[in-house]
């Protein structure tokens, strides 16, 4: 059984990180050079479709043509969305277009793309893109021609015929009209174009891709981020409510009952003081034992909320103490950097990590029937990873009403991911990743 809870924009490495300059140059050049014919085809198709639908607006055929034009704009936009992630080094984002409701009629299906704002952004991109693509195509073509033609001029200078009255660039600049002057000047120009080629082509690609991102994915990214924030807010509220209900239940079932018993014992001892002092002393002894047990339960509850060792000494010491109190042997491996001043995560992340480990070990002890458990906590560049594995009977899942749901909510509230791998028969593996 595999259950995963994750946030949409959280934490993947940027596509293209560490990419070589030559590879990026090839990607940018291909994107710009292919983008011009695509932009031209998109412009012709969309302008024709809009003009035709406007001309037939007085008839019922205008709306279907307009809807088809918007679908065509969506197709060209999807092609562009496939290309820009490799240029911008960002994950691919596709908007959630409106879809007709099940059982909708033909006219409702026709009007659905017309009522979708993203469809009109796709159409605007198809029109505006040609202007930018033309400029970037011309600049990229000139720089590639200058780089290749200039740097290789020495190889084909002898094939170019020169008349007695012809004046080349070297002669106009006053450097002479000899073969050596021509080769030196044009080669120098070629080297300049060659050196600046990656920068110029990269700038052209970013300009064209930036326009596409603004019109084709900008609104979608904003909506996705809003959705993620709303999910995190709901998860935080749910996790807090679950923690408060659990704390209330634990206090009611434990310390509160003991305090009631303590009050009854003290009242009985007060009544026994005059008539039976020996019985009163025995009752007071029982009341003292109840007081010790109550204090022990309160300390246990306080450790679950904010253990002092976590605040004072950091996550490694707190997890070591937690593993030492467990009923099942725990093999612990914690990154020592988490206990240093430079390596400690934020207090909220640190507290969440402790809570996840504490609850996971509690579930292992109560429900897994395991004989051994392995706990690994590591810190990478931008993430804190927690892995809890036991050799129990498996079958754990994230259904509503189970303890793991509260863990998933708490992790999601901190923009993290939570995964449970627990096939029947075991073993069970719980993974949590929190941003640092």
Image (cartoon, helix red, strand yellow):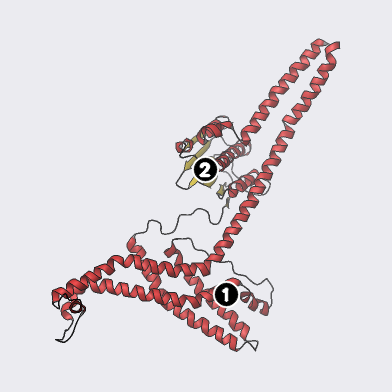
Mark yes or no: residue 27 visible.
Answer: no
Q: Does 59 sit left or right of 313 as displayed?
A: right
Residue farthest right in this picture: 275
- What residue did someone put label 2 on? 386
Locate residue 237, reporting x and y percent.
66, 48
Mark 1 or mark 2: name the one nearer the start of the chain: 1
Mark yes or no: residue 42 visible.
Answer: yes
Q: Residues within 10 Å of mark 2 (few under 14, many from 20)?
A: many
Q: Secondary structure at mark 2?
A: strand
Residue farthest front in this picture: 174
Q: Does 278 sit left or right of 95 as displayed?
A: right
Locate residue 357, reporting x and y percent.
57, 39
Against 72, residue 203 (above or below) is: above
Residue 309 lies in what quarter of the image? top right
Q: Secondary structure at mark 1?
A: helix
Q: Residues within 10 Å of mark 1 (few under 14, many from 20)?
A: some
Q: Does 385 sit left or right of 253 as displayed?
A: left
How far, Cα to Cα, is label 1 from label 2? 45 Å
- What residue did someone put label 1 on? 120
Locate residue 406, reporting x and y percent.
64, 45
Against 48, residue 217 (above or below) is: above
């Amino acid at each position: 059984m595999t259950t995963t809870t994750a946030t949409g924009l959280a934490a993947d490495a940027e596509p293209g990180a560490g990419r070589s300059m030559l590879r990026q140059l090839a990607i940018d050049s291909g994107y710009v050079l292919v983008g011009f014919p695509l932009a031209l085809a998109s412009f012709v198709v969309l302008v024709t479709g809009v003009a035709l639908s406007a001309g037939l607006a007085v008839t019922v055929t205008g709306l279907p043509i307009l809807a088809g034009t918007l679908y065509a704009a969506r197709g060209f936009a999807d092609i562009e969305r496939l290309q820009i992630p490799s240029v911008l080094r960002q994950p691919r984002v596709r908007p959630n277009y409106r879809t007709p409701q099940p059982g909708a009629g033909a006219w409702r299906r026709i009007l659905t793309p017309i009522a979708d704002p993203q469809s009109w952004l796709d159409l605007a991109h198809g029109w505006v893109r040609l202007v930018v693509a033309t400029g970037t195509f011309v600049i990229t073509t000139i720089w590639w021609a200058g780089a290749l033609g200039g740097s290789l001029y020495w190889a084909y200078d002898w094939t170019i015929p020169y008349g007695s009255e012809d004046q080349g660039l070297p002669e106009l600049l006053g450097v002479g009209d000899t073969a050596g002057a021509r080769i030196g000047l044009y080669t120098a120009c070629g080297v300049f174009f060659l050196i600046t080629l990656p920068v110029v082509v990269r700038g052209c690609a970013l300009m064209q891709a930036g326009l596409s991102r603004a019109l084709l994915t900008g609104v979608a990214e904003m909506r996705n981020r809003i959705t993620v924030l709303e999910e995190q807010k709901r998860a935080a509220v749910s996790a807090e409510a679950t923690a408060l209900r659990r704390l209330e239940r634990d206090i009611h079932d434990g310390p509160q009952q003991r305090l009631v018993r303590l009050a009854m014992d003290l009242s009985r001892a007060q009544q026994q003081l005059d008539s039976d002092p020996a019985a009163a002393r025995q009752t007071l002894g029982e009341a003292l034992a109840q007081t010790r047990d109550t204090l022990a339960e309160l300390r246990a509850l306080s450790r679950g909320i904010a253990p002092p060792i976590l605040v004072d000494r950091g996550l490694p010491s707190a997890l070591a103490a937690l593993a030492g109190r467990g009923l099942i042997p725990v093999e612990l491996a914690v990154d020592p950097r988490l206990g240093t001043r430079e390596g400690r995560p934020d207090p909220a992340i640190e507290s969440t990590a402790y809570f996840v480990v504490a609850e996971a070990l509690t579930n292992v002890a109560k429900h897994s029937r395991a004989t051994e458990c392995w706990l690994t906590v590591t810190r990478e560049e931008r993430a804190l990873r927690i892995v809890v594995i036991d050799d129990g009977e498996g079958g754990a899942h994230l259904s509503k009403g189970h303890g793991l749901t509260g863990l998933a909510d708490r992790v999601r509230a901190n923009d993290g991911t939570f995964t449970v791998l627990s096939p029947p028969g075991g073993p069970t593996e719980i993974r949590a990743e929190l941003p640092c």
